[in-house]
Image (cartoon, rainbow, N blue to C red):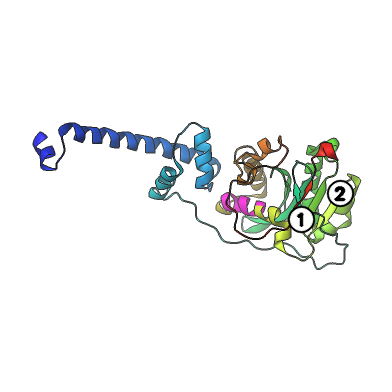
Amino acid sequence: MQALCGLFGYTRQAYYKSIRINARHCLEEDVVLERIHSYRKLMPRIGGAKLHYLMNEAGYRISRKTLFSILRTNSLLVRKRKKYAVTTDSRHWMKKYPNLIRGFDFESPNLLWVSDITYIKVKGEFAYLSLITDAYSHKIVGYCLYHTLESEGTMMALQMAIEATPENKRIGLIHHSDRGSQYCCNDYVKLLKNNHIRISMTERGDPYENALAERMNGILKAEWLDMEEYTDFLQAQERISQIINIYNQVRPHASCNMLTPIEAERHKGKLKKCWRKRKHKHKEIKTIPSRTDL
């Protein structure tokens, strides 16, 4: 062995040291991979940045560069998915409401709820998932999977959100949605008004006017729904309930200083955004005060 080491310009001590280092690195990588797989079991398409945050929170001191190298080497990097179909039809006679939230920034939970509908396939048929999300914490506060695009699904999601939020925490609350018939129908509007919730809607059919709700659809579809198959409607309902619990309680959110939505809900004031902004000009932002100032 000493002769071989000399042939390649190494001392025997250096050779054995390199073996120990390589063995330790392999062991460390195995531990990291095991942890990655445990997170991906709950959140199959969680990205590298969130994995890095979760692992450091759990005590794994690993650099971002090293983690991404491990992900790349093991073909575990997440690729972007396709865009999604539109489920909104605003060509109807019902009253449409103005956009109340343009230019405002919300610094407290339960000041703004955003709503939208997305679809999933259940045994080759479409089913429709209505979501209501708190704009501050990004917590899904109401949801319902329904067989059709009729307003019953959106009504049940709204009823869940109302029942889960005490009346004293809904003071000054705005509900924002697109101009779809499900949100403009008499029953939905009546439920909002009966609970003293102000109504806001997009005005030009621009998806950016309801960007957070659209983003929520994208997260659930890209990270869970588009990869799963459901044998029947009941199984789909149960699985969606599990997914939303994981999203609310486990998944860190880059828009909320890497807090989970449940954690962010307990905060007030601006939450740090942990993603890079594109460079563009911003209009002056008006701030809606926290509930104690209303």
Estimate the x, y position of residue 31 in percent, counting from the top left.
41, 35
Q: Quadrant of residue 120?
A: bottom right
Q: Amino acid at mark 1?
A: Gly
Q: CA distance from mark 1 to mark 2?
A: 23 Å
Q: Amino acid at mark 2?
A: Leu
Kindly state the secondary structure of the residue where label 1 is placed: loop
182 is within the stretch colored magenta = no
| Viewer can see residue 1 | no
Residue 80 position within the rendered picture, expressed as x and y whole percent measured from the top left: 53, 57
> Between disc 1 and disc 2, whose residue precedes?
1
Give x and y (percent) for residue 4: 11, 39
Q: Which residue is mark 2?
A: 192
User: Of residues 22 and 241, which is closer to you in this image?
Assistant: 22
Residue 137 lies, with reference to residue 59, above or below; the image says below
> Which residue: 57% across, 52% down?
276
Q: 10 Å neighbourhood of mark 2: few (<14), some, or many (≥20)?
A: many
Most extreme residue toward the left is 3
Q: Is residue 195 something that shows in the picture?
A: yes
Instruction: Name the quadrant of the C terminus.
Output: top right
> Which residue is rendered at x = 49% and y = 52% of the image?
78
Q: Main secondary structure of the magenta part?
A: helix
Closer mark to the observer between disc 1 and disc 2: 1
Write down the region rendered in magenta.
216-225
Q: Is residue 25 left or right of residue 217?
A: left
Give the labeled residue for mark 1: 103
Q: Badges 1 and 2: C-beta atoms under 8 Å apart?
A: no
Helix, strand or loop at mark 2: helix
Camera-side residue: 183 or 147?
A: 183
